[in-house]
Image: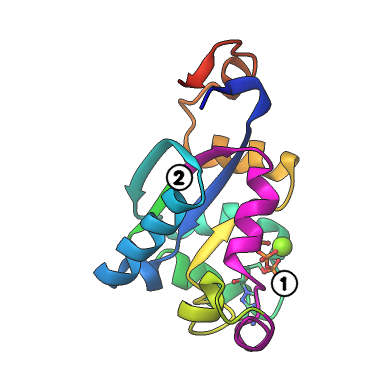
Amino acid sequence: TCRYAKALQLTLAVIKPDAMAHPLILEALHQKILENHFIIIKSKDLVWRREDSQRFYAEHAGRFFYQRLVEFMSSGPMRAYILARENAISQWRELMGPTKVFRARYTAPTSIRGVYGLTDTRNTTHGSDSAQSASREIAFFFPEFNMKEWTEKEEPLVR
Ligand code: RTP
Ligand code: MG
């Protein structure tokens, strides 16, 4: 294979604290990323402070689930990935399945949330929902990453 960096889209994928807490689920999710032909550009484990969580989810401030979401996302370690692939954003969202766990169970039982989701908040993973969110979210998690430089690369990324 010869995959040109320019043809690949980037997305931010996050393994949420519920899935990080279980070593077998963590392993299965990592495997799923590789099996689905994503290239892992960067990954890191981190723990958010409450303020990070509030800032990341600011668009949801005032929604009924905001407090619980903020608490949960700063309750333990997460793993963040910059993933590259053709159509990375939609492909990762597809693999995750629906946000709501009952919907995931019934309409996408083999999706990540269909299999591992616990509740609408503790739903295993996050994925950027658009190119604009991907830029914002990648910069949020990986401030040192130069996205512009990366997307202009002419060379094949994988030979
Ligand atoms: P995001 O905005 O983070 O990309 O996620 P999304 O589109 O899949 O889901 P959205 O409905 O926008 O929800 C934003 C975040 O809040 C959590 N959530 N908790 N009832 C609840 O407890 C509840 N509802 C939504 C979701 O897990 C998601 O992280
Ligand atoms: Mg959303």
At x 63%, y 70%, the residue is 97
Q: Please state if 29 lies on the left or on the right of 112 as rendered.
A: left
Find residue 138 and report its horizontal and vertical position in percent.
Answer: 56, 38
How many marks can you see?
Answer: 2
- The residue wearing badge 1 is 62
SS for callout 2: strand
Q: Is residue 104 magenta?
A: yes
**Placement of 76 over or under 114, stated as above or below:** above
Q: Name the main secondary structure of what is drawn in magenta.
A: helix
Dot 2, crowdedness within 10 Å: few (<14), some or many (≥20)?
many
Q: In the image, which residues are magenta?
A: 82-107
The residue nearer to you, when weighing 52 against 155, is 155
- Mark 2: is the Cβ under 8 angstroms from ligand 1? no
Q: Is residue 70 magenta?
A: no
The residue nearer to you, when weighing 46 against 101, is 101
Find residue 10 and report its horizontal and vertical position in percent.
Answer: 60, 36
Which label sits on residue 103? none
The residue nearer to you, when weighing 12 against 92, is 92
Which amino acid, by three-letter code, is at mark 2? Tyr
- The residue wearing badge 2 is 81
Q: Please state if 45 lies on the left or on the right of 13 as rendered.
A: left
Q: Please state if 26 lies on the left or on the right of 14 as rendered.
A: left
SS for callout 1: loop
Which amino acid, by three-letter code, is at mark 1? Gly
At x 45%, y 52%, the residue is 35
